[in-house]
Image (cartoon, grey):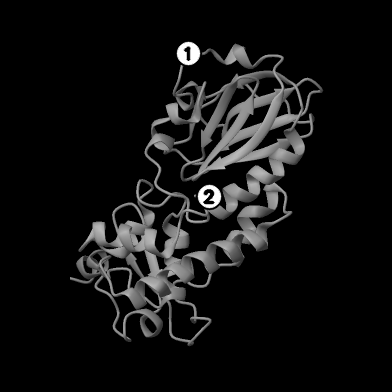
Amino acid sequence: MPELPEVHALAADLEGRLRDRVVARLDLLSFAALKTFDPPTSALDGQVIHSVTRQGKFLDLNIGDLHLVMHLARAGWVRWNDGTRPAPARSPKSPLAAQLLLDDGTGLDITEAGTKKSLAIYLVEQPTQVPGIARLGPDPLSGGFTLVALQDILAAAGRAQIKGVLRNQSTIAGIGNAYSDEILHVAKMSPFKPAAMSPDDAARLFDAIQTTLREAISRSEGLAASELKKEKKSGMRVHGRTGEPCPVCGDTVRQVIFADSTLQYCPTCQTGGKPLADRVLSRLLK
């Protein structure tokens, strides 16, 4: 799933390609992806694209007086189409969910792999009309996201596990499963640590949030959309690296499996050398 750094870089790449361009039309191949019906997608025809920005993990294309907002979910992505890939016939097997076509025949292919479809496209007058955007917490790279602001968030979360707090988009916008793993590794914290923590721990977590996200953005800066997934994977220290040596201490990276996701961590760096209980694995071993 693309998170804040990838969506930030994707927005920057698309801004350079799309700004001041004219939309011919939006073709939908997966009607389920479109979550709004008024205004109709035909309202985009002939309109100028003013900007492409990021709202948490949402892409926001300001087109004419409207906003075409996309949440790429777990398996969605956007690819530049130079005009050589025509829209295929509608098929449940095709990953192509929609095409945003420009007046010169180029445009964007909006895709979603797999069978679990969660890609969401909205056409609205204001971004805050999208429920997910209306509920977003503060952006961790904004000027208003200070150490004091983080301490207030952690105090309000109380005994909730810090991994879940970091992933909660209503609490902090843009951090998902992958970068919460990375942030906690940098901060040397267990993912199960309670959110209400000491001032020193909160300061260490704040610094880890800032450095992890900004370094990821720096690595992605200037990359085309087609290169971002590879860059994200190559830049990870522990996420997605179960069984590999920790780049800091050399211990083996472990994982905990949940119903719909997994987390990765280093026991030596984060949990005092103790492996975390993995209930799924424990059930399999019985």
| Neighbour tally class for label 1: few under 14, some 14-19, many 20 plus, Cα within 10 Å | few
- Secondary structure beneath dot 2 equals loop
Residue 11 lies left or right of residue 158; in this view the side is right
Q: Position of residue 259 (x, y in %)?
A: 29, 54
Mark nearest the camera among 2 and 1 is 1
The reply to whether residue 249 is visible in this rendering is yes
Who comes first in sequence, dot 2 or dot 1? 2
Looking at the image, residue 152 lies above or below residue 30: below
Q: Amino acid at mark 2?
A: Pro
Q: Residue at x 47, y 56 (%)?
A: 140
Q: Amino acid at mark 1?
A: Asp
- Label 2 to label 1: alpha-carbon separation: 27 Å
Q: Which residue is mark 1?
A: 38
- Secondary structure beneath dot 1 equals loop
Q: Position of residue 45 (x, y in %)?
A: 67, 14
> Dividing the picture into quarters, in which one does residue 98 lie?
top right
Q: Position of residue 90 (x, y in %)?
A: 57, 21
Q: Residue at x 40, y 35 (%)?
A: 134
The one nearer the camera, 247 or 146, is: 146
Check the picture and name the quadrant holding the C terminus. Answer: bottom left
> Dividing the picture into quarters, in which one does residue 193 lie?
bottom left
Q: Residue at x 25, y 68 (%)?
A: 194
Q: Position of residue 44 (x, y in %)?
A: 63, 17
Looking at the image, residue 177 lies above or below residue 40: below
The one nearer the camera, 126 or 190, is: 126
Residue 243 lies left or right of residue 7; in this view the side is left
The reply to whether residue 182 is visible in this rendering is no
Looking at the image, residue 166 lies above or below residue 116: below
Mark sitting on residue 2:
2
Mark sitting on residue 172:
none
Q: Residue at x 45, y 30 (%)?
A: 128
Looking at the image, residue 101 lies above or below residue 269: above
